[in-house]
Image (spheres, helix red, strand yellow):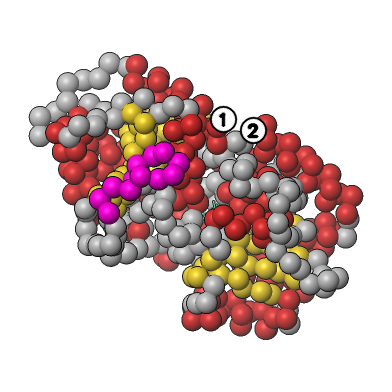
Amino acid sequence: MRIAMISEHASPLAVLGEEDAGGQNTHVAELAAALVGEGHDVRVYTRRDSAALADTVSTPDGYQVRHVPAGPTRRVPKDELLPFMGEFGRWLAEQWRDGDWTPDVAHAHFWMSGLATLHAGRRTGVPVVLTYHALGTVKRRHQGARDTSPPGRIGYERTLGRAADRVIVQCQDEVGELVRLGVPRSRMALVPSGVNLEMFRPDGPAEPRFAGRSRILTVGRMVERKGFPDVIRALPAVPDAECVVVGGPSADLPPADAFARRLRTLAESCGVADRVRLVGAVPREEMGRWYRSADLLVAAPWYEPFGLTPLEAMACGVPVVGTAVGGIADTVVNGLTGDLVPPRDPRALGLAIRRLLADKVRRFAYATAGLDRIRSSYSWKRAAEQLSAVYAAVTAVGRPTPAVV
Ligand code: UDP
């Protein structure tokens, strides 16, 4: 099957850990590769955000990346990309109508990609599948006035959910959010993200550690809602453990980064500065080394549409202390593969970390159960198989004659 994946701001080729580069980039890259593994012909369309990018890049994983000329050829924060989605959609429609490759199905990632893809799908008869990755309602609830989403996002998301041929949801929490938004349950298919089981495995090299100190690892983009300040506030309750924070600008830049500076100041005021280490962004291929070096992973976001880092840790045989939000509430089984605590509660977080660090047997039991869970339920192969079935179902439905542009 010919599959187009549209990911306007999140290129599968991007360096991860910066503000707008994280889980969606990984998701698109891994999913595209897994779909190729299932025998599909896959093209990923992402915005050309640098003049240095070639029109087309063929990846070693066997899928193509097409850089779409829409908006300026420089990095633009994702919340400012809406005005260019019309151009993006028109370009897609032209390619699929007049070019030599028309997809059987188009899978859009994030609501803005959904707008461009629906525009092109309506004009070419290509069915559209949508994964939101994040929802405006949730962001608004948690960020209030600090939410930088374009006005109208929630309305667009509702319309998209009703117009797309299928909505892929990643966790139970998202199902509830979308039903409340007015998206029919019958349009949804639950297909959680996977984890790369070659890259994330228990055996393999690990980053060195200081003798005698336990290591807590926390990973993610340097944005407030990832809960890094809560992890640092929890540290005084966890004596002797070192906390390694992975993510953010490249390793030589953290001192200049405003958020990283705030974390340092906070660590000083909590009296734990000597136990907090900001590593900066780490290439994806090296992430396994960091997970394997840790006694446990802390994932403490305020909210989380899915959350890949707990899966990656579990795949490396590392137990998780997470907040009971979004996808983490599905992926981490409380008391079996890790411990769940309420979000934005450094006290509860500190207690859970301290208790788990003090209990080697429990950590071992969590690690074993986590690994089992990942291998049985969260491989990308499994996700690609489930999605192939969804794509087959939407392409089997008769299409109306495409609208004349
Ligand atoms: N990541 C990485 N290097 C970094 C920081 C993060 O490769 O320095 C990866 C991490 O391994 C995970 C993704 O970025 O695959 C973050 O995904 P998650 O779902 O946790 O967060 P999101 O960015 O989607 O909010």
Specify whether residue 56 is painted magenta: yes
Rendered residue at 79%/45% (across/down): 366
Residue 97 in view: yes
- Viewed as shown, does residue 44 lie left or right of 288? left
| Quarter, ligand 1 | bottom right
Mark 2 or mark 1: which comes first in sequence? Answer: 2
Residue type at numbered disc 1: Arg
Q: Quadrant of the C terminus?
A: top left
Residue 122: which quarter of the image?
top left
Residue 179 in view here: no
Work out whether 388 lies above or below 178. above
Marker disc for residue 382: 1
Return the residue nearer the eye: 11 or 107: 11
Crowd band around label 2 with a 10 angstrom C-alpha radius: few (<14), some (14–19), many (20+): some
Relative to 158, say whether 143 is above or below: below
Label 1 secondary element: helix
Give me the residue at 78% from left, 46% from top: 367
Residue 359 occupies which quadrant of the picture? bottom right
Report crowding for label 1: few under 14, some 14 to 19, many 20 or more residues within 10 A (C-alpha).
some
Determine whether, in the image, residue 284 is placed left or right of residue 351. left
Cβ of mark 2 under 8 A from ligand 1: no
Q: Which residue bears the numbered disc 2?
A: 377
Question: Is 377 part of what is drawn in magenta?
Answer: no
Magenta part of the protein: which range? 54-65
Q: Amino acid at mark 2?
A: Ser
Which residue corresponds to the image point at 73% horizontal and 81% vertical from the top-left?
274
Q: Residue at x 27, y 37 (%)?
A: 118
> How far apart, in angstroms, are the residues tagged by discs 2 and 1?
7 Å
Q: Residue 346, image x and y in percent?
A: 70, 66
